[in-house]
Image (spheres, helix red, strand yellow):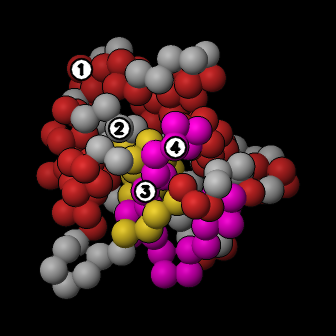
Amino acid sequence: MKQMLALSHSVQHSPFTRSVVRDCYARVAAGTRSFHSSVNSLNTETAAHHLVSVNVYRDNMSELAYLLRLLKSLSESNKWITLIAPPAGFSTSLLVKAGIDAKHIRIARPTPQHDASSLLEKALTCNTSAAVVAFGQTHDFDTADQLAALNETPTFVINGFGAQLH
């Protein structure tokens, strides 16, 4: 895991994405569990989105590293870490290696009746998750963005989680 997290950071991402993930981690590490205050403290153009996009690529693991630390801290609340629509071969071992108890991880997979966006909305509405992590593109979850704004549950969308990371 240490080798994977120490890869170079050559892929450029928006300052919004990286600063939100790092700021959320810093707030949790400092004992402040207010997730949305970090999102809302940004400029109005980016603060309109309450789903935090986490960009993960083979040559850029820094956002994943911060996310894993944040999820570990949040999992101590005895609520679920809910994964929405992870890739087919996804293994929870990455989360377990980061120190998250496997008993606190739940996975919701899309069905013909419920797509990933509706599963995300359901997870936020139930308020039983310490954090909700969806896999896909942020625009796939636009309908859940307003619900995330009203909810205190940290909500992330992982982009670029390829087969090489399982």
Q: Amino acid at mark 3?
A: Thr
| Badge 4 element | loop
Q: Find residue 155 and report its horizontal and vertical position in percent.
A: 37, 43
13 lies left or right of 62: left
Q: Which numbered circle lies on residue 82?
A: 3
> Nearer the viewer's eye, disc 2 or disc 1?
2
Q: Nearer the viewer, mark 4 or mark 2?
A: 4
Q: To which residue does mark 2 refer? A: 153
**Mark 1 to mark 4 CA distance (whole Å):** 33 Å
Q: Is residue 73 left or right of residue 152?
A: right
Q: What residue is drawn where x is 36% and y is 74%?
A: 109
Residue at the disc numbered 4? 78
Mark 3 and mark 4 residues within 8 Å of each other at the beta carbon: no
In the image, what residue type sits under mark 2? Thr
Measure how far apart labels 2 and 3 are at the Cα level. Answer: 11 Å
Which residues are the magenta region? 75-96
The residue drawn where x is 22% and y is 72% is: 115
Residue toward you, 12 or 6:
6
How far apart, in angstroms, are the residues tagged by discs 3 and 4? 12 Å
Q: Amino acid at mark 4?
A: Asn
For label 3, the SS is strand
Q: Earlier in the sequence, mark 4 or mark 2?
A: 4
User: Which numbered tag is attached to residue 44?
Assistant: 1
Report x, y in % for residue 72: 62, 42
Q: Is residue 137 visible?
A: yes
Mark 1 residue element: helix
Image location (x, y in percent) of residue 67: 57, 43
